[in-house]
Image (cartoon, rainbow, N blue to C red):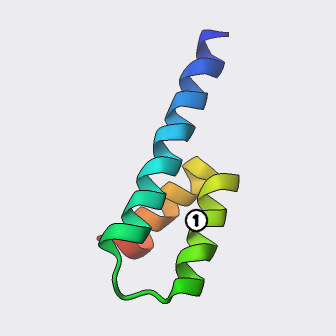
């Protein structure tokens, strides 16, 4: 039960970080691409955050 809570909190933080970074820091992507990143962040938060970090955020 504690592990599920920790994973859920990590997933929430990952989704929030990804969405925040996509919409405020990333000025090179189009609106459509930002929407795609946002949808992916909501659906697959931890995996999307990792992929986004290595592909875009650096």
Residue 31 as seen in the image, left or right of residue 28: right
Q: Which quadrant of the rendered structure holds the C terminus?
A: bottom left
Which of these two is toward me, 53 or 18?
Answer: 18
Residue at the limit of the structure toward the top, as seen here: 1
2 shown above or below 13: above
**Residue 34 rendering spot, x and y as whole percentages:** 53, 77
44 shown above or below 30: above
Residue 27 as seen in the image, left or right of residue 47: left
Quadrant for residue 35, please give it: bottom right
Residue 51 as seen in the image, left or right of residue 24: right
**Residue 57 rendering spot, x and y as whole percentages:** 34, 69
Q: Identify the residue at horizontal 49%, vertical 89% (top origin).
A: 30
Q: How many marks?
A: 1
**Residue 37 rendering spot, x and y as whole percentages:** 57, 70
Q: Identify the residue at horizontal 65%, vertical 20% (top origin).
A: 4
Q: Which quadrant of the rendered structure holds the N terminus?
A: top right
Q: Identify the residue at horizontal 40%, vertical 63% (top origin).
A: 53
Tag 1 secondary structure: helix
Which of these two is toward me, 25 or 48?
Answer: 25
Which of these two is toward me, 40 or 51?
Answer: 40
Q: Residues within 10 Å of mark 1 (few under 14, many from 20)?
A: many
Q: Identify the residue at horizontal 53%, vertical 50% (top origin).
A: 15
Location of mark 1 (residue): 38
Quadrant for residue 33, please give it: bottom right
């Amino acid at each position: 039960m504690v592990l599920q809570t920790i994973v859920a909190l990590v997933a929430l933080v990952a989704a929030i970080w990804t969405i925040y970074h996509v919409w405020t820091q990333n000025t090179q992507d189009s609106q459509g691409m930002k929407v795609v990143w946002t949808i992916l962040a909501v659906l697959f938060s931890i995996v999307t955050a990792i992929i986004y970090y290595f592909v875009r955020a650096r």
